[in-house]
């Protein structure tokens, strides 16, 4: 890989935590180098003590794709230092460096539809088969298939994915996005409640998948996905709701708490 781009390691940034905390499913780690595809671009990324090194990446790629993807313009140090709650302080201390990735909305929606009643290894397997079967590019480096492409398929066409009941939801989502019934531009530009209502027009998309899509695909950091882990967190630690210090950044607080609580049971 001829094109290599380096940046000083940002504060409150941990590459492994960002890519392996349950918010994205197309990244793999090989010899301490993360490999993945986003925005149609294959890349390998390595973190050292002082640097983040991007392989197969020009300066233009970094500025146009990866600086945004890793949300490098956001001051996470300021955000997490404002969390004056004892549980959040511990989660941030143990897993300092998690950031909310700015993923493509369609990939986020599709991924979290596939995540329903599923575990992370199996989700990754289904998504990898989806990309290999219907994406573009070289084997192992294929793009995420577009809504337009998937909208022309049938549930039977998705049988090789072994996605089960989720296949019909993917087809419905693809058709509604491709024909404009679900308008990503309007969701992006509107208050979060609009997106919550719009996304749940898709078959099989309930509150949790909608919140995940809004947080990870539209970067609405006040979204608050609730899965089994977050339900436990709320019951055990926050029966009266999240503390006031998280207001406006509930999605970031959720990601720290989710990863911290999930890792406790390993």
Image: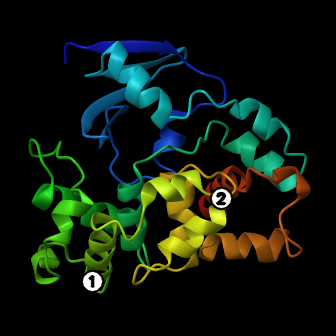
The residue that appears at 60% across and 27% down in the rendered structure is 73
Mark 2 or 1, nearer chain start: 1
Label 1 Cα neighbours within 10 Å, binned few <14 / some 14-19 / many ≥20: some
**Placement of 146 over or under 155, stated as above or below:** above
Label 2 Cα neighbours within 10 Å, binned few <14 / some 14-19 / many ≥20: few
- In the drawing, does residue 62 fall left or right of residue 91? left
Is disc 2 in contact with disc 1, using a CB cutoff of under 8 Å? no
* Image quarter hosting the N terminus: top left
Kindly state the secondary structure of the residue where label 1 is placed: helix
Question: In x, y percent, where is residue 253?
Answer: 72, 53
**Placement of 194 over or under 215, stated as above or below:** below
* Image quarter hosting the C terminus: bottom right
Kindly state the secondary structure of the residue where label 2 is placed: loop
Question: In x, y percent, where is residue 210?
Answer: 53, 70
Please give the label number shown on residue 37.
none
Regarding residue 182, the answer to whether it shows in the image is yes
- In the drawing, does residue 97 fall left or right of residue 38? right
Residue hosting label 1: 168
Residue closest to the far bottom? 165
Regarding residue 23, the answer to whether it shows in the image is no
The residue that appears at 86% across and 40% down in the rendered structure is 82
Residue hosting label 2: 191
Question: In x, y percent, where is residue 12?
Answer: 66, 30
**Placement of 224 over or under 160, stated as above or below:** above
The residue that appears at 30% across and 16% down in the rendered structure is 58
The residue that appears at 39% across and 25% down in the rendered structure is 64
- In the drawing, does residue 77 fall left or right of residue 194? right
């Amino acid at each position: 890989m001829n094109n290599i781009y380096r940046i000083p390691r940002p504060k409150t940034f941990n590459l492994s935590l960002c890519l392996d905390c349950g918010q994205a499913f197309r990244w793999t780690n090989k010899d301490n180098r993360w490999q993945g595809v986003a925005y149609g671009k294959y890349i390998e990324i390595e973190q050292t003590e002082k640097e983040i090194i991007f392989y197969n990446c020009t300066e233009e790629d970094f500025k146009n794709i990866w600086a945004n993807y890793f949300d490098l313009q956001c001051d996470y140090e300021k955000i997490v230092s404002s969390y004056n709650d004892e549980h959040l302080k511990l989660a941030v201390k143990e897993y300092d460096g998690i950031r909310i990735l700015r993923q493509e909305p369609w990939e986020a929606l599709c991924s979290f539809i596939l995540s329903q009643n599923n575990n992370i290894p199996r989700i990754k397997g289904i998504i990898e088969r989806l990309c290999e079967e219907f994406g573009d590019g070289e084997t192992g480096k294929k793009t995420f298939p577009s809504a337009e492409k998937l909208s022309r398929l049938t549930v039977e066409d998705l049988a090789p994915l072994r996605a089960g009941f989720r296949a019909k939801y993917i087809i419905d989502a693809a058709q509604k996005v491709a024909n404009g019934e679900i308008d990503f531009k309007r969701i992006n530009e509107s208050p979060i409640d609009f997106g919550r209502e719009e996304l749940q027009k898709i078959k099989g998309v309930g509150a949790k998948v909608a919140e995940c899509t809004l947080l990870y695909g539209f970067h609405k950091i006040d979204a608050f996905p609730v899965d089994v882990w977050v339900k436990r967190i709320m019951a055990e630690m926050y029966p009266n709701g999240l503390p006031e210090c998280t207001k406006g950044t509930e999605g970031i607080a959720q990601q720290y708490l989710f990863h911290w609580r999930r890792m406790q049971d390993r």
